[in-house]
Amino acid sequence: MRCEEVEVLLPEYASGALAPGEAEAVREHLEVCDQHPEAVELVTGVLALAAASEPVSPPPQLRSRVLAAVGAQESGMPSRRRRLSLVASAALLLVALAAGWALIPRGSEDARVLAQATGEDGATLTLVQEGAALVVAVAGLPQPPSGLAYQLWAIRGEEWVPLHTMGAGVTAWRGSVGYPFRRGDQLCLTLEAPEGAAWPTSPPVLVASVVADP
Amino acid sequence: MDGTERREAWQGEPTVRALRSRDVDAFAALYDLAAPRAYGLALKVLHDPQLAADVVQDAFLWLWQHVEQLDERRGTPTALLLTVVRRRAIDLLRARANGRERRWEEDLELPSGDPRVLELLESHEASARIRRAVDALPTEQRVVLELVYYRGYTAPEVAEALHVPVGTVRSRLRLALGKVRAALGAEVLR
């Protein structure tokens, strides 16, 4: 992109009103060309507009919603360091399934099934209370399509909170979740990008309703 | 003061470094600091408290999911958050108005503005000065700014709606943003 073209597009670029491709072209030009001092001025003006919006106290419950979702991701979504151990765990889980072991310790007095769903293909989605912990178990899923992974969600009313993304190629998972499930909530599984999504972008694969308070 | 120090100058704003270490407390501090501005911005675009709250939650989660990729030499977390909030709010607005949803893939690299603007606007007086500057814009400039910045229209769309050449729209937008920037005072970019 030439300097003259960049100059024309600067106000829209600063305002975020350009299509991504055009914005990228302008940004690449600005990275290597110092002939556009006005760019910084315009972007600063835009930033001022955003920051000068009248602050309004958000609904009090929004803070806990955001932090709960972040906490759920943090406990459920593996860091790069933990990813190998999760793969190993998933492999062990599959071995356990092949051996016919039960995922849920049904004989334990501490374990209580709060939600369960079974798909037509035999896949299961279960929420179990084990002492103070809430444990989700997913098993028997078909291989996710290439480029997608299964993602778990908690649903309360209209609100969807991401709990865990299972990773590309992973068809079973078991782990504790930090979300404070209660009766009436739902546990849901969708197919999303492997890095996870903030909002569901595909129809539910499985939905299990929580039938009792922990 | 180098760029990094300047970007850490906003009192109380967690650094990219702290967020990148996935420090939930730092993230909570960012929420406490930035959520009222983010929610106020979303409300201004959407005029719907429920949708505004959803957008703010979505933006914070997006930031958390991408924080490992943030570059502290560019924009602050709050600046990025506000950018994401506005874009997602506009997406929703357009989708609701005419089904023309435009999904932005948010840039992890912000256009470089002067991050001291956030520090300055911590004062209510400076924020009020910006709002007064917007109110004082000539009507034709304020309308263009409103349509582009708070409604998400492109310059060609605004030109069509107002029956003026697209160059005129760009010129009015340039003048409006320049005046907003000037209202920050001489201390920025000196």
Image (cartoon, rainbow, N blue to C red):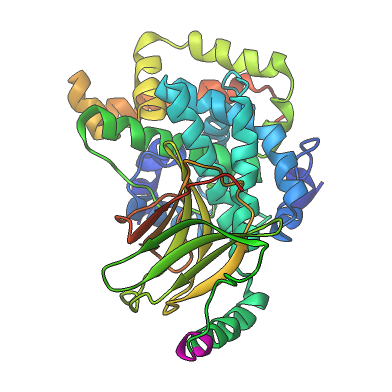
A55 w.r.t. A82: above or below = above
Q: Residue at x 74, y 20 (%)?
A: B123
* Residue range (magenta): A95-99
B164 w.r.t. B98: above or below = above
Residue nearest the observer in this picture, A126 or B97: A126
Where is residue B126? Give x, y as percent.
Answer: 69, 18
Residue nearest the observer in this picture, A107 or A70: A107
- In the drawing, does residue B184 fall left or right of residue A173? right
Say if the magenta span includes residue A162. no
Where is residue A153? Give x, y as percent.
Answer: 47, 54
Q: Residue at x 32, y 61 (%)?
A: A205
Where is residue B74? Give x, y as percent.
Answer: 63, 52
Dominant secondary-structure state across the stretch colored magenta: helix
The answer to whether residue A74 is seen in the rendering is yes
A95 w.r.t. B162: above or below = below
- In the drawing, does residue B100 fall left or right of residue A24? left
The answer to whether residue A28 is seen in the rendering is no
Residue nearest the observer in this picture, B21 or A65: A65
Say if the magenta span includes residue A98. yes
